[in-house]
Amino acid sequence: VNYLFEPIQSTANVLLESYEGLRATGDNEFACLALNMYADQLFMSGCLLPVVEKKIEEFALRSLRLHQLQYCRNLCCIHNRVLSLTGNAEGKNPFDLLRDNDIATEDDLLQESLSSGRSGLSQQIYF
């Protein structure tokens, strides 16, 4: 598995540069898509999990500020996974960011995505 870290780490920065370029042109939807893909790469890159946790939390906030709720939800799922791996899942709930009384856990988000037909979000949850 170690041989995969270098390619993942080297390609992740391209996604962050894409995010910044797309934000500069005002394309918030694809900017948040690039940010979401960057977060996935960061999660798999072998970086220290506390660093990854802080960055992904920041990315979810950015997506929310840009009114890209679908990407914010994906980032909350990644954030939840990182918190579980670091043992901090009890102390912090990334879904509080959504400010949605119906979605308090990943299971609630899964039920909502299944009932609305959002298969991409369901796949993100069961990655």
Image (spheres, helix red, strand yellow):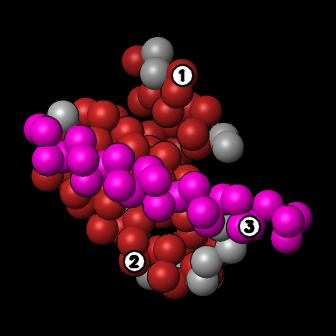
Kind of residue sitting beneath label 3: Phe
- At a point 50% along the width and 74% down the height, the residue shown is 52
Q: Which residues are magenta?
A: 1-26
Residue 100 visible: no
> Which of labels 3 and 1 is toward the front?
3
Tell me the amino acid under the disc marked 2: Lys
Q: Which residue is mark 2?
A: 54
Location of residue 54 with respect to 38 vertically, above or below: below
Q: Nearer the viewer, residue 75 or 92?
A: 75
Q: Is residue 8 left or right of residue 79?
A: right
Q: Quadrant of the N terminus?
A: bottom right
Point out the image quarter for the C terminus: top right
Between residues 92 and 47, which one lies in front from this camera angle?
A: 47
Q: First in sequence: mark 3 or mark 1?
A: 3
**Left or right: 30 with respect to 56?**
left
> Which sits earlier in the primary sequence, circle 2 or circle 3?
3
Can you tell which mark lies on residue 119? 1
Residue 120 in the magenta stretch? The answer is no
Residue where numbered disc 3 is placed: 5
Question: Residue at the location (61% across, 77% down)?
Answer: 47
Residue 11, percent from left and from top:
57, 55
Residue density around tag 1, few if under 14, some if 14–19, many if 20 or more, within 10 Å: few
